[in-house]
Image (cartoon, rainbow, N blue to C red):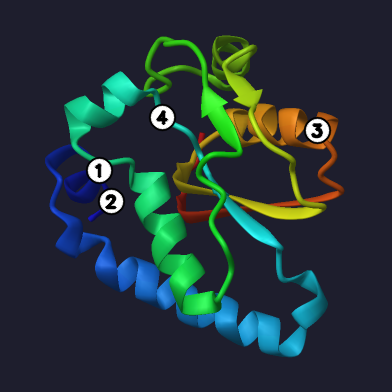
């Protein structure tokens, strides 16, 4: 479902996944409201890649979750500054090396944030993004994704 959404632009496949995730998060925050982030930060995509694909799936997911959970989305807090080799097919160490120096913080970072992406495989993207957010002042960083794959 995620592949059809991400690579074929068939957004209808993401809707039930996002709705189920929003329901799960809403019930989690009812029990533990102090863990709700101040802002959602979608994993950034280069503008050229976004034009090519037609959308940024992480931003779509973040905006849907933000609307459902009343959490602002900070799409302009971090940007991707350079193109890298596609992560797909790379191992954990290669993914980490591939992502170094890719993100730049552009605005003030809230203390509690959630990084939003479609899939987490090795966690390299989230790890590097979290590192730049922590350096910019984030104290608590959560990672939200529709799926986790082995890898």
Q: How packed is label 3: few (under 14 Cα within 10 Å), some, or many (20 or more)? A: some
- State the image quarter where residue 71 is shown: bottom right
In the foreground, 106 or 132: 106
The x, y position of residue 42, in whole percent, is 50, 45
Q: Which residue is mark 4?
A: 45
Q: Earlier in the sequence, mark 4 or mark 1?
A: 1
Label 3, label 2: how far apart the Cα atoms are:
31 Å
Q: Position of residue 85 (x, y in %)?
A: 40, 10
Query: How far, Cα to Cα, is label 4 from label 2?
Result: 17 Å
Looking at the image, is 31 positioned above or below residue 78?
below
**Residue shown at 47% from the left, 75% from the top:** 22
Report how far apart the C-alphas of labels 4 and 1 lie in the structure.
13 Å
Look at the numbered discs 1 and 2 and tell me whether their residues touch, using CB distance below 8 Å. Answer: yes
When the figure is inspected, residue 80 is found, relative to residue 146, above or below; the finding is: above
Q: Is residue 149 visible?
A: no
Q: Which residue is mark 2?
A: 2
Q: Earlier in the sequence, mark 4 or mark 2?
A: 2
Percent position (x, y) of residue 13? 20, 61
Instruction: Find disc 1 in the rendering and name its residue.
Output: 6
Q: Is residue 119 left or right of residue 5?
A: right
Q: What residue is at 81 percent from the left and 36 percent from the top? A: 134
Q: Quadrant of residue 128?
A: top right
Write the residue at 60% across / 22% down: 103
């Amino acid at each position: 479902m995620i592949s059809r959404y991400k690579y074929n632009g068939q957004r209808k496949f993401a809707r039930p996944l996002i709705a189920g995730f929003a329901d799960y998060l809403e019930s989690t925050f009812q029990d533990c409201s102090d863990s709700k982030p101040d802002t959602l930060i979608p994993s950034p995509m280069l503008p050229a890649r976004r034009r090519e694909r037609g959308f940024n799936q992480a931003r779509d997911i973040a905006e849907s979750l933000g609307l459902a959970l009343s959490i602002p989305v900070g799409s302009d807090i971090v940007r991707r500054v350079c193109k890298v080799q596609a992560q797909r097919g790379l191992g954990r160490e290669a993914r980490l090396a591939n992502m170094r120096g890719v993100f730049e913080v552009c605005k003030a970072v809230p203390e509690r944030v959630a990084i939003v992406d479609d899939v987490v495989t090795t966690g390299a993207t989230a790890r590097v993004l979290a590192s730049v957010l922590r350096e910019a002042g984030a104290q608590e960083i959560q990672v939200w994704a529709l799926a986790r794959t082995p890898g």
